[in-house]
Image (cartoon, rainbow, N blue to C red):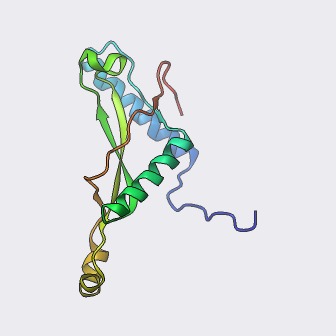
Amino acid sequence: MKNPPAKPSQLITKEFAKQLNINYNNKKTASLTAKGAKKEDANAIWYSLEALESYIHYIKTHGAKDGYNVDGIRFYFGVYPDDEKHGEKAGLTTLFLVPTGKKVEDNTAKIQSFALVQDAAPADIQSLEPMNYGNIGRPPSLIY
């Protein structure tokens, strides 16, 4: 490979990842036991590269049409409603993705407010749909 990609600055060690997963599992298990839960909850969510690449393409394309500079994806934890409509997922943990970015200003306004635009934190883009329904790591639970 001529120009290998730079190593991302957000990488963590496998040992730290394992500890984070153990902490999550222990905390979640304690919470479920206290509530008398009978189901084993998700402790991992998987998305295919194809699904992620498709979503990234979707949010970049549609975000630009809506006047946004899409700059990232925020991952939210959620819990499915505890009703039969959601089948085996009812009451269980999920992870959904929301695009973030900034509204693109016209050139005149951008020059005048450049510092303000640069300092603003990325916001969730409400005009684009979040992505959900990855494959959950249960049963059995996956341990990192």
Q: Is residue 136 left or right of residue 111?
A: right
> Is residue 76 shown above or below 82?
below
Name the residue nearer the viewer: 36 or 55. 55
Residue 28 sits in quarter: top left
Residue displayed at 51% across by 43% down: 17
Which quadrant is the N terminus positioned in?
Answer: bottom right
Rendering coords of residue 10 (x, y %):
49, 58
User: Residue extending furthest right?
Assistant: 1
Q: Where residue 30 sits: x, y (%)?
A: 32, 24
Q: Which quarter of the image is occupied by the C terminus?
A: top right
Image mark count: 0
The one of 82 and 130 positioned closer to us in this rendering: 130
Nearer the observer, 93 or 50? 50
Q: Residue furthest top?
A: 38
Please give the name of the residue rendered at 48% of the width and 18% of the height, measured from the top-left corner: 139
Q: Which residue is pictured at 28% across the width and 79% down the height?
A: 106
Q: Position of residue 35 (x, y in %)?
A: 24, 19
Residue 72 in the image, given as x and y percentages of width and height: 40, 58
